[in-house]
Each structure stands twice: as C-alpha cells, then as structure tokens.
Amino acid sequence: MRLFYLVLLAICAVSGCQPADKAPISSRLLIDEASVQLQLTPADAPVETPLQLQVYGEGIAEITGEISGISMYMGRVPLKFSRHDTAWQAEFLLGACSDPKMLWQVELELTLTDGKKRLLKQQFHSSWR
C-alpha cells in the first residue's frame, strides 16, 4: 500500500511540473471594411512583446506604414510588410512607458495594383502584461 502512495505521489508531482497549455492568442480587428481588413495580434497589444499586423484585401501591390504614440511621444515605429498567402504581415514591438494603457496610431499607405494609393489610420491601446 505504501508503494502505491509513493507511485501516486510521483505521478502527481511529474504531471504538475508540465507547462500549462497556453491559451490561443486572440486578435483584434482594427479596421473591417468590405475592401480591406486590418488585424492586430495579440489583441491586448502587450508592450515589449512581438506583435503582428495583418492586412487582408484584394488588389494590394505594396504597403508602407508606421506606428506613432498619441498619448505620449514615443518616436515612430516603422513597419515592414511582406506578403504571406492571403495577407500582408508586419511584426513589430512597442516600447513601455509610464502609461499602462498607451494610445497609439497606425498609419498605412496601400499602393493598389491599379496605381492608386489609399491611406488607412487607426488608433489602438497597448497594455502592460
């Protein structure tokens, strides 16, 4: 009987040391129009953590853009987009500041395949994790 409890204790100890499954990373739709969608991942935009913007839309030839602080000047974060399957993606980091819910603005210029340009601007908040 004593051996049974030792084995049970060992199993509990080993299973308790396994890393917990991470919850899926959620995304936030910043712009949702018929012709273009802009999505931010993770949705709560934690500072000093890799973040990703995805742009979905037809007829986009190129995207340039940057992120700047609205609540406080934090410089400009340039965005470099690349095409991945059905979306354009850019990865970036936001710096931490004294404001736990900093307001930022993303500004994108889309060059369409017909040569026209479209400007997108949207604000969002970052968070401390």
Image (cartoon, helix red, strand yellow):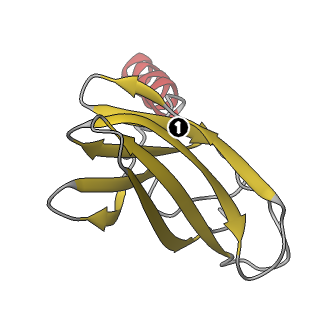
Q: Is residue 106 visible?
A: yes
Please tell me in which quadrant of the rendered image residue 92 appears.
Answer: top right
Residue at the disc numbered 1: 90
Single out the residue that lies furthest toward the front.
115
Please tell me in which quadrant of the rendered image residue 28 appears.
Answer: bottom left
Q: What amino acid is found at the position of numbered circle 1 in the picture? A: Ala
Residue visible at 43% across and 16% down in the picture: 3
Depth check, front residue: 86 or 9? 86
| x and y percentages locating residue 38 in the rendered image | 36, 55
Depth check, front residue: 90 or 96? 90
- The quadrant of the picture occupied by the N terminus is top left
Above or below, 53 relative to 44: above
Residue visible at 84% across and 61% down in the picture: 75
Q: Residues within 10 Å of mark 1 (few under 14, many from 20)?
A: some
Above or below, 35 relative to 4: below
| x and y percentages locating residue 13 in the rendered image | 52, 29
Depth check, front residue: 28 or 10? 28
Please tell me in which quadrant of the rendered image residue 88 appears.
Answer: top left
Residue visible at 48% across and 70% down in the picture: 122
Depth check, front residue: 120 or 19? 120
| x and y percentages locating residue 23 in the rendered image | 38, 46
Above or below, 28 relative to 56: below
Above or below, 58 relative to 124: above
Secondary element type, mark 1: strand
Single out the residue that lies furthest toward the left.
34
How many numbered marks are there? 1
